[in-house]
Amino acid sequence: MSNEKLNAEISEAIVNLDKEKALELANRAITDGLNLLDVVEHGLGAGIRRVGDLWDEGEIFLPELMLGGNIMQAAMELLLPHLKEHSETFNRGTIVIATIEGDIHSIGKTIVGTMLSANGYDVHDLGADVPAEKIVNEAIKVHANIIGVSALLTTTMTGQKKVVEILKERNLRSQFKVILGGAPVSRKWVEECGADGYADSAVDAVKLVKEL
Ligand code: B12
């Protein structure tokens, strides 16, 4: 099966909340040797965003949104180890990544972390709902070069700015590059926060980190 066809089918399986089909297609993508990052971003990613839109439009309710998220995660658990398999062995740099406090959206952050790890970076993924102070402390502890902060809610985006503010307060700003991401994040917001970069996909996140 081609990447394009599989992406369309797996996206539809997510929208239909058909877990069995989604997992069957994820396994098919592996055995057919397809571009798995493309499947994650343009197949699963497109499907879950459509689920989000349907929820926004009142077409489905919260339990369905949650089920969609669970199916996406289950499919990702199958695919991500195969992305990691091709990882480069040398260390290009150390990155601490997390979703900010108050925000439990972890899918995009996990994809970005996995892609960076597959590209030779030492990634410390702190998970979701992580306080800004903890992110900074962890970055100091592991001698990170880059701090990546994800936010999916307009109400939690301010936590991204807090990370930069804490670094300034502690005179640590020049020691770390800070990159931001998540659906509501824009280049303008990154400037407003005084952060160093922004990416809206895992591929661009890897490019951005290489540049920095
Ligand atoms: C799945 C989902 C959930 C799942 C999350 C499961 C999980 N473990 O992550 C569940 C069901 C739990 C959930 C809960 C909620 N959700 Co929700 N959710 C979504 C949905 C549909 C998809 C998000 C997603 O996974 N996208 C797929 C990934 C691949 O894309 P991504 O996250 O954007 O990540 C990419 C880029 O942004 C970038 N990136 C991401 N992070 C980073 C970090 C760095 C450093 C960089 C460089 C790049 C980067 O690269 C990623 C890879 O491509 C979105 C809709 C949407 N359009 O985003 C709503 C959405 C984000 N949710 C929303 C809401 C409101 C909620 C709830 C408050 C609902 C409720 N009433 O309880 C709760 C939040 C609870 C909380 N405190 O956090 C709203 C937010 C509205 C707003 N503007 O604030 C959205 C936009 C839905 C909508 N259309 O209204 N949600």
Image (cartoon, rainbow, N blue to C red):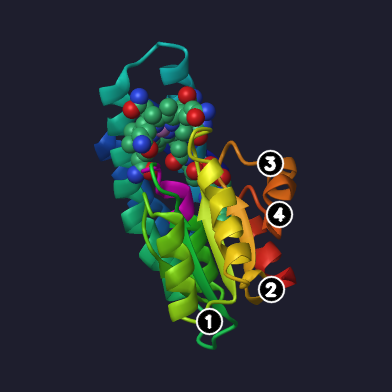
Using residue 109 as the reference point, say whether residue 19 is left or right of it: left
| Percent x, y of residue 137 | 44, 70
Q: Nearer the viewer, mark 2 or mark 3?
A: 2
Q: Tag 1 or tag 4, which sits nearer the N-term?
A: 1
Q: Which disc, if any, is residue 186?
A: 3
Label 4 and label 1: CA atoms lie apart by 31 Å
Q: Tag 4 or tag 2, which sits nearer the N-term?
A: 2
Q: Tag 2 or tag 1, which sits nearer the N-term?
A: 1
Q: Nearer the viewer, mark 4 or mark 1?
A: 4
Residue type indicated by callout 3: Ser
Q: Which residue is pictured at 69% across the width and 73% down the height?
A: 174
Residue type indicated by callout 1: Glu
Packing grade of label 4 (10 A; few <14, some 14-19, many >=20) is: some
Q: Secondary structure at mark 4?
A: loop
Q: Tag 3 or tag 1, which sits nearer the N-term?
A: 1
Instruction: Tell me the residue that label 2 is attached to.
Output: 174
Q: Which residues are magenta?
A: 103-110
Using residue 142 as the reference point, say whether residue 17 is left or right of it: left
Mark 4 beta carbon near ligand 1 (under 8 Å): no
Q: Are marks 4 and 3 in contact (CB under 8 Å)?
A: no
Q: Which disc, if any, is residue 194?
A: 4
